[in-house]
Amino acid sequence: MATIRLGDIAPDFTADSTQGMINLYDYLGDGWGILFSHPADFTPVCTTELGTAAKFKDEFDKRNVKMLALSVDGTTSHAEWIKDINEVQNTTVNFPIIGDEDKKVSHLYDMIHPNADDNLTVRSVYIIGPDKKVKLMITYPASTGRNFHELLRVIDSLQLTAYHKVATPANWEHGDDVVVSPSIATADAVNIFPKGVVEVKPYLRMTPQPNI
Ligand code: BEZ
């Protein structure tokens, strides 16, 4: 079992998927990626999640994030399940789902938490940067479907803070003011952020989002 932490290189793999064999690094190219696991096929919460994910694909595309789902059943089963998802969610699943019957990828990414369930994955989310490093990990139990608005929100934060010396405060949404990185002195911040810097406390300086 692998232990993956933020900043680690995301382990590469080649696996079968609903769109044929996929090599993770080739699939991601030089863009961002989101790898998210599903406990099993033909399960209710996963059905809603995958339909919702398909409806959000344009938003992931806009952010240059490739989507890759995984479920521990095989791709023949996935193909049948996708018909149901498309029907009940009124969508078209338009990204690959890895078939992981041997649980190779699930174990590589520590997606099976035996004290939760021996055989099914939890709902893991890995966001991988263009440098192939893990930028974010979130883990939900099988009983809780993910919020795809939140996944886009954290991607916006990750992409903003990767290229600007800022951090995003609690409940930040794209367009809100951001926090100046603690590593920057206020005297320098006023030059780096021409839209203005407000010093609430010497350690808490706010500035308008720099990339809009
Ligand atoms: C579901 O997707 O609905 C689900 C899967 C496994 C356990 C519980 C719920």
Image (spheres, rainbow, N blue to C red):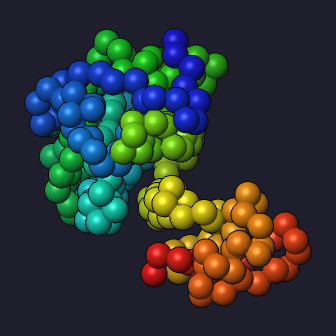
Quarter assignment of residue 90: bottom left
For the point 43% across and 18% down, the residue is 108
Q: Is residue 166 visible?
A: yes
Camera-side residue of 121 and 211: 211
Placement of 15 over or under 199, stated as above or below:
above
Q: Is residue 39 left or right of residue 41?
A: right
Placement of 118 over or under 24, stated as above or below:
above
Q: Residue furthest left?
A: 20
Quarter assignment of residue 100: top left
Residue 86 in the image, given as x and y percentages of width and height: 19, 54
For the point 30% across and 22% down, the residue is 13
Residue 44 in the image, given as x and y percentages of width and height: 39, 45
Q: Residue furthest bottom?
A: 195
Placement of 98 over or under 33, stated as above or below:
above
Q: Is residue 78 visible?
A: no
Q: Is residue 209 left or right of residue 206?
A: left
Q: Quadrant of the C terminus?
A: bottom left
Placement of 210 over or under 76, stated as above or below:
below
**How many dots with numbers?**
0
Residue 23 in the image, given as x and y percentages of width and height: 22, 27
Camera-side residue of 38 and 19: 19
For the point 60% across and 87% down, the residue is 195
Residue 57 in the image, given as x and y percentages of width and height: 27, 59
Q: Is residue 116 left or right of residue 103?
A: right
